[in-house]
Image (cartoon, rainbow, N blue to C red):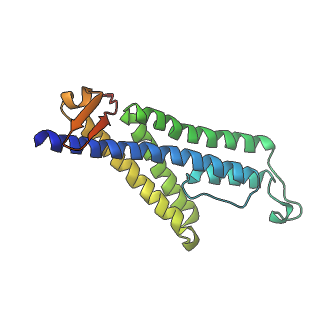
Amino acid sequence: MKDQNSMMQKRKLFSQMKGTSSSLLAIVIFTAINLVLLVANADSYFLFSAYIPYYATSLAMYLCGMYPADYYMPGDEFLPGGVFAGTLGFSIVFLGVFLLAYFFCKKGKTGWLIASTVLFALDTVALVLLVGFDIDLIMDYVFHAWALISLILGIVAFNKFKKLPPDEIVVDEVVVEDEESTEELEAAPVDNE
């Protein structure tokens, strides 16, 4: 019975860890799509996205005169295009941290997961400070809260997984046989940092 409870706990933690890494990848993908849509002047926006890269790139586009002419007053002066290029580079690096966190998270390195959680928390604070409370952005607020909770639960799951007895972590594949079926469970690689 103890082995079965341990196996169930391990499965639950493993599932939470996979969910967290999937959340990181979704943040990267949807933010990248939003940036492409923004630069293409499309009027679409996906919610599962980081706010800072989108805001910074949008602001740079505005300041560099890259929006349609009706956004500006006659005689407005614009910044050079290099400002936009630099800001877009910043946005790509910002996303790169989440992408690296995704890859290292899959290898069990919790330091990157913690860094990405802190970065997303800062992104959430920036959303609230820069926009304030806008009822039109309620789904953005809900998404940010959900993503933060997912990332925090992932950190907790990784830490609990690391504390499992070594014989339960070292096993690459566990086969559980019952009367009707055989199930396989892959253990996530965990690196004790």
Quarter residue 164 falls in: top left
Q: Is residue 129 above or below residue 107?
A: below
Q: In this view, does 193 lie above or below 73?
A: above
Going by the picture, which residue comes out furthest to the front?
A: 180
Going by the picture, which residue comes out furthest to the left?
A: 1
Residue 136, percent across and down?
Answer: 58, 71
Q: Quadrant of the N terminus?
A: top left
Query: What is the tally of numbered marks visible in this picture?
Result: 0
At a point 80% along the width and 64% down the height, the residue shown is 71
At a point 36% along the width and 42% down the height, the residue shown is 17
Residue 81, percent across and down?
Answer: 80, 43
With 1 as the anchor, is 130 left or right in this view?
right
Q: Of residues 111 and 28, which is closer to you in this image?
A: 28
Report whether residue 8 is seen: yes
At a point 43% along the width and 40% down the height, the residue shown is 115
Residue 84, percent across and down?
Answer: 74, 45
Q: Of residues 63 and 175, which is closer to you in this image?
A: 175
With 1 as the anchor, is 106 left or right in this view?
right
With 125 as the anchor, is 19 left or right in this view?
left
Report whether residue 60 is seen: no
Going by the picture, which residue comes out furthest to the right?
A: 74
Q: In which quarter of the image is the C terminus?
A: top left
Residue 46, percent across and down?
Answer: 60, 57
Quarter residue 105 falls in: top left
Q: In this view, does 150 lie above or below 181?
A: below
With 26 as the anchor, is 160 left or right in this view?
left
Q: Of residues 175 and 70, which is closer to you in this image?
A: 175
